[in-house]
Image: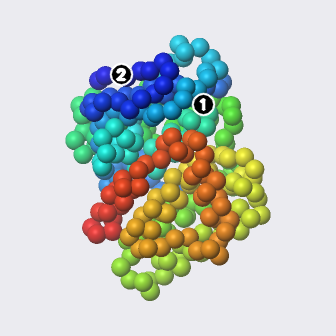
Amino acid sequence: MATLMSGSRIQPAASVLSSSIKRHVGFNSHLRSNCSLSPFHHSSFSFRRSGPRRSLSVSMSVTPLEACVKASITVPNKLGDCPFCQRVLLTLEEKHVPYDLKLVDLSNKPEWFLKINSEGKVPVVKFDEQWVADSDIITQTLEEKYPNPPLATPPDKSSVGSKIFSTFIAFLKSKDPNDGTEQALISELSSFNDHIKENGSFINGKEISAADLSLGPKLYHLEIALGHYKNWSVPDSLPYVKSYMKSIFSRESFANTRALPEDVIAGWRPKVFG
């Protein structure tokens, strides 16, 4: 398995199977929470992001965390569409923890990956020589090991918006316009709209927290998949939801970790037509 590094600018890598990227950034001291093959397919290419060099707050000798995630099935060398993988990468980015990104093809699981995770699911992150699976556990571990900036969401707000993803999937899969799935989704979005209106820009108020990093990727999938397959978008009657989505999607961390729209569309196709 090759490791690709760059000390200044990070340039697009060549098409190399089972490769990795060094993410040199500053370092500071509910449905499934991982992706299997369905509905999110996987690929195995190296990935690098072009962009200016970022200042490090510690020595370059800091060892990046290794993170196995989904890769694009539509374009070589791009990150795939798993929202649980993006949740983990968002947490790493928001905490400025350097990481070594490894893109894995779970439709043709490489032997090295099965050795570290016999279930063959992503995301998986290596902490202290131990591979840890499940985005819930990974993000909790990151909060414990890298407490600054703090991202923990208070227990009374941690479940805000948690039913949006399941109602989105039900509506996306629905073939009957009168089965109530659209209204169920609108109801959940309306409750979330009221929460943001009363509490501030994010779930926990003015500052982003772990709950936002979990919900944001799911709303990204909602926007793209429903727009493509049902010509549907969040109603204008829910302005705080629309503003929230804009705020999340415009963050640098989100831009660095989001999937290509064509991957989101391809990833949900089996759920729509299967």
Q: How far apart in space, not on screen, are marks 1 and 2 (Cα)?
A: 21 Å
Question: In the depicted view, which residue is nearer to us: 146 or 16?
Answer: 16
Secondary structure of residue under mark 2: loop
Q: Which residue is mark 2?
A: 3
| Residue appearing at x 48%, y 82% in the figure | 180
The amino acid sitting under disc 1 is: His
Residue 34 lies, with reference to residue 231, above or below; the image says: above
Seen in the picture, residue 78 relative to 168 is either above or below; the reply is above
Per the rendering, the mark at residue 31 is none
Q: Is residue 108 above or below residue 146?
A: below
Let me know if residue 160 appears in the view. Answer: no
Residue placed furthest toward the bottom: 178
Identify which residue is drawn at 57% across, 52% down.
Answer: 249
Sequence-wise, which precedes: disc 1 or disc 2? 2
Across and down, in percent, residue 81 comes to: 40, 50
| Label 1 crowd bin: few (<14), some (14–19), many (20+), radius 10 Å | many
* Residue 108 visible, this orientation: yes
> Quarter of the image holding residue 11?
top left
Q: Identify the element where label 1 is drawn.
A: loop
Q: Quadrant for the C terminus, please.
A: bottom left
Q: Position of residue 78 (x, y in %)?
A: 37, 41
Where does label 1 land, which residue? Answer: 96
Identified by mark 2, the residue type is Thr
Task: Give me the residue at 76% from left, 59% from top.
Answer: 199
